[in-house]
Image (cartoon, helix red, strand yellow):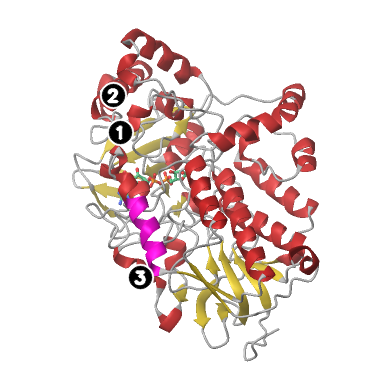
Amino acid sequence: MNNSDTTSPDYEVIVIGAGVAGIYQIKRLADLGVHATVLEADSGLGGTWYNNRYPGARFDSESYTYGYSFSKELLEEWYWKEAFSGQPENLRYLNHVVDKFDLRQYMQFNCRVDAAHWNEEKTLWRLSVCDGRVLTCRFVIMALGLLSIPTLPRLEGMSDFKGRSFHTFDWPHKPLDLSDKKVGIIGTGATAIQVIGEIADKVGDLTVFQRRPNWCAPLNNYEINDAEMDRIHSRYDDIFEICLRTPGGFEHEPDRRGFFEVPREERVAMWDQLYDEPGFGIWLQNFREIFTDEDANAEFSEYIADRIRKRVTDPETAEKLIPRDHGFGVQRVPLETNYLEAYNQTNVHLVDLSDAPLDRVTETGLRTTDAEYDLDVIIYATGFDAMTGAHDRIDIRGVNGQKLRDKWRDRISTCLGVFIHGYPNLMMPNGPQSGSASTNYPRGIETGVNWCMDFLEHAWAHGHNRIEVTAPEEERWTKHVEQMYEVMLMRKAKSWFTGYNSNVEGHEEGTIRYLVYNGGMPKYRKALNDVADAGYKGFIFSGDHKATVDAASASVA
Ligand code: NA7
């Protein structure tokens, strides 16, 4: 179908991406009877959980707080098997959701969108798909994922390597036997920390190439039996109610007592308890000063450093695993299983790249400035072009042909992380500067999608075919997001939270990119609601377009 030369678009809404956000987004559109489709670049649904098939890939969120909350029936019939469920089960869950609600009919796979151009005259978007089609729609919804564009190091010789090498995001879908292999892994972020803990005792030999260590804490995963799952089922209302009121969208609530008002022994007793508990409690149930006060952060970081010293047998290795350039929690905290203990195994070696950086990839392995390492497999656990990377890969052009890539080159600006001035009818339920990145992701997604749907229903009910945020309203939000970084210790961190990526031009050290809304979920939701309650003040509506909202026309008119 291609009627792009008429003013009636092929679809009312096109959703780009069939990950966790895209699935819920199309569910809401389908329920309303909106003529919509999802274009997905991969050959299956699931986004992050479709791609990241590396050993050890699993939730850091409690499984039962990660699942969708929109359907009681879905909640009741699904039995999570682990507190922090692994990738295969997570993908099975998402497929179950899609089949249960018959959503596959709206999804088109192997459909990478290469370009999205706004046509002002016809008030529609024209999308170029990799299969050669041009599809038009009134509204485009970007559900592209936060971490969907993997980045490789800029090293010489990468194509010379004769063994197997891949980014963790592209881990082979077919089983890979590493039992007698010499494996090298570059990176010690959240991904590498999961991989290393999982494969250390399953590979012949493992060499970890660490440029900077990362603070981490135990995941403390456990199996959930049916009886426990039944108890969880009975608590779901409470669980989601708590997730709604906590900044991170988890059950973990920050300790609101003043750090220095609580005696040191009491602080330590609390940390001892949190360290042994499952999940992000050690990060998010801690004192709030951990995020804002240098002294409080330093004291707690030293506590975690001691934990590392206790768990890693060789003192020299332990010291190398302790971060010196940032405190605990100012970068995204990886949760681990057996990560530190892996370094006590004789087949696991730590190469500290701060002494001798990587020089190049050779035919037989990796070379640093002072040694050569023979390897059969190289795993690049080197991170992502976070949050804006997937937008940058699409040639998005708004009013007057302005490229989004150019607009965002020096400064990312959005309204609520959802709208961008100059890009009418384009929405991002989980975009940069939205509440999703710093929260339990699906909780942020449901909030974002619900708000977008309310906005669309408002537009359809009033016959508006064009919505655009004003420049001042965008500036108001962007400044607010930027100002919030001022009190956070994380503003100094070299992490994807500040837009740092040494492998992407322009994102290297020294450039801070304000990608994350740091106010927490309740404040973010209030900001969204305030805009809606004010009748979407700060937005320009126009036209008297009558949407093709078949089933919905009665309910929204
Ligand atoms: P991260 O957290 O961005 O980690 C990437 C890691 O790779 C980090 O340790 C980097 O060191 C290292 N890296 C990147 N490039 C190089 C080069 N060229 N040489 C050596 N080391 C390098 O990505 P993850 O995939 O681990 O985690 C991303 C998110 O996924 C995570 O936050 C969760 O939300 C899920 P650096 O620190 O830059 O020195």
Label 2 environment density (alpha carbons within 10 Å; few <14, some 14–19, many ≥20): some
Q: In 3D space, how far apart are the residues under numbered discs 3 and 2 (Cα atoms)?
A: 38 Å
Instruction: Kindly identify which numbered label has been placed on residue 296.
Output: 2
Q: Are marks 1 and 2 in contact (CB under 8 Å)?
A: yes
Q: Are marks 3 and 2 in contact (CB under 8 Å)?
A: no
Q: What's under tag 2, amino acid-wise?
A: Ala
Give the percent coordinates (x, y) of residue 432. Answer: 44, 56
- Count of numbered tags: 3
Q: Determine whether the beta carbon of the residue marked 2 sits less than 8 angstroms from the nearest atom of ligand 1.
A: no
Identity of the residue drawn at 53% across and 62% down: 536
The stretch in magenta equals 471-482
* Horizontal arrangement in the rendering, residue 123 relative to residue 359 (left or right): right
Give the mark nearest the N terminus, 3 or 2: 2
Q: Quadrant of the C terminus?
A: bottom right
Q: Is residue 412 visible?
A: yes
Which quarter of the figure has residue 344?
top left
Identity of the residue drawn at 54% across and 45% down: 441
Inspect the magenta stretch and tell me whether residue 134 lies in it.
no
Which quarter of the figure has residue 101?
bottom right
Disc 3 element: helix
Instruction: Kindly identify which numbered label has been placed on residue 292.
Output: 1
Q: What's under tag 1, amino acid-wise?
A: Thr
Q: Which residue is mark 3?
A: 407
Q: What's under tag 3, amino acid-wise?
A: Lys
